Image: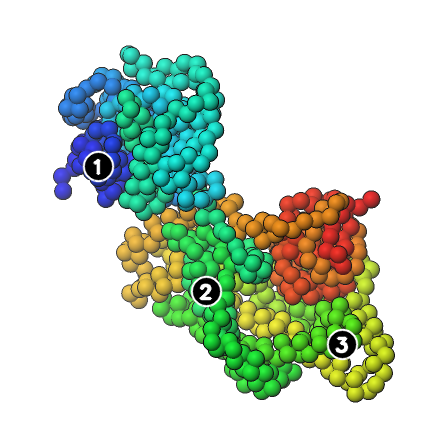
Amino acid sequence: MARRITGPLADFGSRDLAAAGGKGAALGELLRHGFPVPPGFIVTTDAYRSLLAETGLGAAMDGMDQNMRDGGALRALFARFVMPAPLRTEIGEKYAALGGGAVAVRSSATAEDLPGAAFAGQQDTFLNVVGEEAVAKAVADCWASLWTDRAIAYRQRQGTDPRGVTIAVVVQKMVPADVAGVMFTANPVTGERGEIVVDASPGLGEAVVSGRVVPEHYVLDRTGVIRSFTPGGGEVVISPDAGGGTVEQPGSRSPVPSLASDQLRELADLGRRAQEHFIRPQDIEWAVAGGRVHVLQSRPMTALPPQPLRLNQVQRRVGPFFVEMFQERPYPLDVSGWMEQGILAMLHRMAGSVGVRFPGVGELLPEEDGVVVQLVPPVPRLTLRTLAAPLTLARRARQFKLANWKNDPRFTTFLEQVDRLNARDPEPMRWPEVVGVARESFATMRGITDLRSSYLPGIFLPMLRLRLMLLLLGRVRLASALVAGAETMTSRANRSLEQLAAMVRADPGLAAAFASSDGTALLQLVEQDPSHAAFRAAFAGFLREYGNRETVSVVLSSSPTWSDAPDVVLGLVKVLLGQRPATADQTGAALAELKRHPLLRFGPVRRQVMAAVDDARAGMAFREDSHFYATKVIPPMRRAYRELGRRLVAAGVIDDVKDVYQLRFGELEAIADDGGALPASVLHRYRPLVQARVARRRELEGIPLLDTALLFKDRRSAAGVLVAGTPASRGRAEGPVRIIRGPDEFGRLHSGDVLVCPYTNPSWTPLFQRAAAVVVDMGGLGSHAAIVAREYGIPAVMGTGTGTGILAEGQRVVVDGSAGTVVAAD
C-alpha cells in the first residue's frame, strides 16, 4: 500500500491510529458518524517518517542517546532541518482546499488519547494559525513537540518505547468560540457514571485546559439537567487575534451560567453518543460559536475511579474480612490462577456443601481493560439445600473428628503431592509443562479444600456447645480468651523466631550486625559473613519449615512468601531482640476463672466443660493449620510463574519477570514455544496487552479497591476518643504509636510500641510478642490478629477503619481493648 502523506479528516477512523495518531483517529471517527467536528485534514505519520528519512534527521537521532531522553538536543536537531519541498507543497495544497483562513493545528501522536495514557497536553497545539507559511511552521513545531521534556518524561513513566512513537498532525478550521471547555461523561472525582461534568469559560477553551481560569462548573444528569452549578472566576478570556494567534484579556466574574439549558442538553447528548460509540467514558473538548456546538476532541477518560458502591448491611458486615485479604490490587494472574482456581474455588466448594452460593470472581472483583478496579463485598445467596445444612454439618462433625485430621489419608496424599511439586525443576521443561506445574498446584490445593469441607463443621458445633455452656454458667465473655491458647503452626513458628532471636543475642558480632543494619544489607551480612554460619544454618532450617508463609495475603500469588523475602523474616527477628513487655495471660486467667465456678466442682460438669474447651481449641487449631498447609502449594506455583516470566523477558514480551502477573492464566496456557524460543507472534500479541494493563493499573494507583468509609460510616465515637473499633482483646496499655503498613517495615517496631496497621495475617503475629497493643483498620474478633493478641495477652482493637490515617507516628496513646477505643495519653 502506497504511503499517504495527507488526507481529509473524514477519511480516517478508529482503525487508522497508526496513520492519524490518537486525536486524528478519534476526530475522523466522530466526523464520519455525524458529530459536529470542524472539517480539516491530517498530515499523517508517514509525513513525519519521510521527514526523518529524507532529511537525514532520522540518522542523526539514531546516533543520539539510545533512550532519547535529551529533549533539548532533539529539538535542536529538528530546528536544523528544513521540511522537504514536496511535503511542504502538499500541506499548502490541502490548506488551500480547506478554504485557507484561520485553522487550529493539533499534534496527534500514536501513543496519545488511548485507554490508560491520555498524553494530555504533552504535545503542542497551535490556535488561530493563518497563512500557508504559518501552517507549515506549526506542523513542524508539532513534530518537534514530540520531544519536549514533558512528553519524554511522560512516556518514560508510561513505559512507552520512544522509538516506536510517531506523530501525525490535525489541521482544522478554527472555531472562534464564544464559550468553550471540557466535558466528562462520568464524574472524574467520584466515578459516578450517572453524572456528566462540564467545565466552561467565555472565549477559547485554552483558558480552561491550561488552567488559566477557575471555570464554571456544571454537574448534569444524563439528560443534561443541572444538578449543581458553581460560577467561574472569570480571570481571563482568550480569543483569536485578527492577525493570527491568540490574545488574552481580563475577564469578569458572573453568577449567570454562560451555557443555556438547550446547549447543556445538546452537550450531554453528544457526550452520551460519544461514550456509546467508543464504549467507554469520554473526555471531550468542545466549543460554542454563533450558537452552534462543536466537538474539538474526544479521548477515553483516564484515572477514572470505579462506580461508587452502595453497600447493604450484609456487605458492610463481611466487607472488613475481604478488605483485609485484598490490601493490594490483584493482578490478572492472581485472579485467574490461584484465586479463581484455588482459594475462591475452596470457598465456593465449602459454601456449596451447605447450600450457600457465593458470587463469582467477576462479581467480587470487577475489571476494566483486564485490570481489577474495585472490590465488591459478596452477598451469599441461600438455596433450598440450606434447609438441610444443620443435618449435613452435624453428620460431618460426627464423622470427622478434628483431633484426627492429620491422620486422614487425604492429608498424607496432599503432603506427598507437595513434595513432588517441590522436586520439579521448571527450568528445563517445555512451556506447557511449566504451565502444568502451576495447574498441578491448583489441583493439589483441592486436597486441603476436601479436608476443610469435611472437618470445618467440627469447629462450629464445639464452639456452639462451649458458648451454650458458658451462657448457662454466666461466663460467655470468657469464650474468646479460652480458645486463644491452641497450639498451631503459627505459634510454633513464633517460638522458632524467638529461638533465632536468642541466637542473635548470644553472639555479640551478630547482635551488632542486627543493630546497625536492616533489609537487604542485613540479609547480605547473614548470608555472606563466615562467622555467622550457625545462625545461617538455623535460619535456612526455619525457612524450609515455615518459608511458605505469605507476607501480604494468602489470596495473592504475586506477593512473596517468607522464603522469597527472607529480609522480612530477619526484620521479625530484629523486633524480637527487644525486651518483651509485661502482658497478662488472658487464656490462663480465663481458664482459672472458669474452673473456680461452683458448678465445676462436680466432676461430670467439669469434664464436659473442659472437653468443650479442648474441642473448641482443636477447631481453632485446624482452621489455622489448614490455612498454613494450603500455602505449601504457593512456592512451586511461584517458581513456575517466575520461569514463565523469565522466558517472556527473553522474548521481549515483558520487561520484568514480575510482569508475568499482568497476563491471565488462560493467556499463558495459550502460548506455544515450538520446542524452543517463543515465536515472534507472542511478542506482537501480548506486549501491547501487558503495556495497556500496566498503564491502567498505574491510573488506579491511590484509588482503594473499596472505600472503607462505606463500612464504618455509621460509627460514632465518644468525646475524646481518637479511634474506635471492635473490642478484640481485653486490657489497657499505653505506648507510642508505630504505624507499620507492610512486611517491609516490620523491623521498625520497637518493644513497647502500639502497633497500628491496615491489616494483618499470620506472618504479622510475631510482632505481637513485642507490641504493647494492636490497633488494626480491618478485621474482627475471629481474625488472626485478634486470636493471637488474646493469646499474648495484649489489648487489641480491630476494624477501626481509619486508625492508620488518624493516629500519628510517635503519638502516645492508651489502647483499651475491652472498650475498643484509643485515646490520647495524659
- Residue with the mark numbered 1: 34
Q: Which residue is mark 2?
A: 359
Query: What amino acid type should be assigned to the residue bearing mark 3?
Result: Leu
Q: Is 808 drawn above or below residue 563 in the view shown?
A: above
139 relative position to 810: left or right: left
Where is mark 3, residue-wise? 472
Judging depth in this view, the residue of 570 and 722 nearest the camera is 722
Locate residue 494, reporting x and y percent: 69, 66
- For marks 3 and 1, the one nearer the N-term is 1
* Badge nearest the viewer, 3 or 1: 3
The answer to whether 333 is drawn above or below residue 353 in the figure is above
User: Badge 1, how many Cα within 10 Å: few under 14, some, many 20+?
Assistant: few
Say which quarter of the image contains residue 209: top left
Disc 2 residue type?
Answer: Pro
Bin the neighbour count of mark 2 within 10 Å (Cα to Cα): few under 14, some 14-19, many 20 and up: some
Question: What secondary structure is found at the residue carrying circle 2?
Answer: loop
Q: Residue drawn at (19%, 19%), measured in percent from left and top?
A: 100
Describe residue 743's horizontal placement relative to residue 42 as left or right: right
